[in-house]
């Protein structure tokens, strides 16, 4: 269903239309990325989150808190994909 919402919005509005970023389509895009991630489809999740971050940067700007939150998520997923684990700090007892 989330995929259908995204495709419907894309067909009705320009991809960079301001309403797209705050619309259900973008929320669905974000949710779908998390769904892919939870199902172990990291490649799909990262590609979708990359698109989402690009849109947020373009419309909200690179320093907007929402842009930064999404970018942090994307970077975390990339680090996990490299097998480096969490970047939350040193492990206890290290």
Image (tube, rainbow, N blue to C red):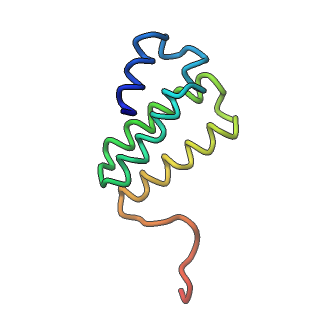
Residue 28: give x, y in percent of width and height. 47, 34
For this view, does 50 lie left or right of residue 44? Answer: right
> Looking at the image, which is closer to me, 93 or 34?
34
Q: How many marks?
A: 0
- Residue at 31% over, 45% down: 43
Residue 51: give x, y in percent of width and height. 45, 31
> Looking at the image, which is closer to me, 28 or 61?
28
- Residue at 48% over, 27% down: 25
> Looking at the image, which is closer to me, 44 or 27?
27
Q: Quadrant of residue 50?
A: top left
- Residue at 56% over, 25% down: 23
Q: Relative to 56, is 16 above or below?
A: above
| Residue sitting at the far bottom | 93
Residue 59: give x, y in percent of width and height. 62, 22
Q: Relative to 17, is 47 above or below?
A: below
The quarter in which the N terminus is drawn is top left
- Residue at 48% over, 46% down: 74
For this view, does 66 lie left or right of residue 3? Answer: right
């Amino acid at each position: 269903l989330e995929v259908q919402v995204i495709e419907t919005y894309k067909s009705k509005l320009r991809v960079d239309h301001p309403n797209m970023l705050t619309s259900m389509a973008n929320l669905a895009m974000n949710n779908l990325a998390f769904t892919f991630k939870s199902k172990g489809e990291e490649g799909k999740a990262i590609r979708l989150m990359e698109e989402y971050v690009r849109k947020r940067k373009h419309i909200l700007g690179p320093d907007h808190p929402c842009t930064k939150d999404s970018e942090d998520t994307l970077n975390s997923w990339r680090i996990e994909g490299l097998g480096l684990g969490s970047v939350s700090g040193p492990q206890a007892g290290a």
